[in-house]
Image (cartoon, grey):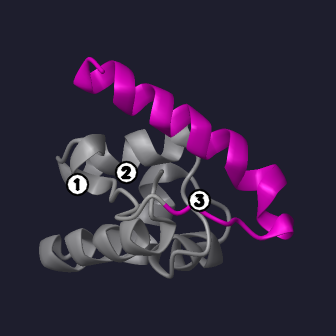
Amino acid sequence: MIDIKKTGQRIKNVCDTQGVTVKQIQKELHIGSFQSIYSWFQGKTLPSLDNFYALCKLLCVSMDSMIVEHETNDILIIPVCMVDTNFQMIERVQLYRKKYMGI
C-alpha cells in the first residue's frame, strides 16, 4: 500500500530540493488550481496517474522513487470523502509499480 502522507512529503521535498515551485508545476501540468498541488504536498490526495507521471518527468525522477510504501501490514484507511477520487488512482499506481518492478 502507498503511504499517501509520506509520498506527499517526498514530492514536496524533491520539488523544494530542485527549486520547482507550485506555480511552475501548475503551469507545466496545466492544473487549474494550485490548491490541488498543496493537497499532494500535505498528503491529503495524490496526483492523478497522468499528473504523477508528468510531475516525475518534470522533476527527472522515476515514479517508483517518489512512492513511499506503507511500512506496516496495517490496512491503509482512506476517508470516505477520498474514496471516489483516490482509491481507483491508488490501485492504478500500484499496478503500474508492480509492472514496472516486474513483480
**Neighbours of disc 1 within 10 Å: few (<14), some (14-19), many (20+):** some
Q: Is residue 94 above or below residue 17?
A: above
**Labelled pair 1, 2 in contact (Cβ < 8 Å):** yes
**Neighbours of disc 2 within 10 Å: few (<14), some (14-19), many (20+):** many
**Label 1 – label 2 distance at C-alpha:** 6 Å
| Disc number for residue 75 | 3
| Disc number for residue 45 | none
Q: Which residues are magenta?
A: 74-103
Name the residue rendered at 47%, 36% in the picture.
94
Q: Which residue is mark 1?
A: 59
- Reply yes or no: does residue 75 show up in magenta: yes
**Label 1 – label 3 distance at C-alpha:** 30 Å
**Labelled pair 1, 3 in contact (Cβ < 8 Å):** no
Q: Main secondary structure of the magenta part?
A: helix
Q: Is residue 103 above or below residue 43?
A: above
Name the residue rendered at 59%, 59% in the picture.
75
Labels in figure, total: 3
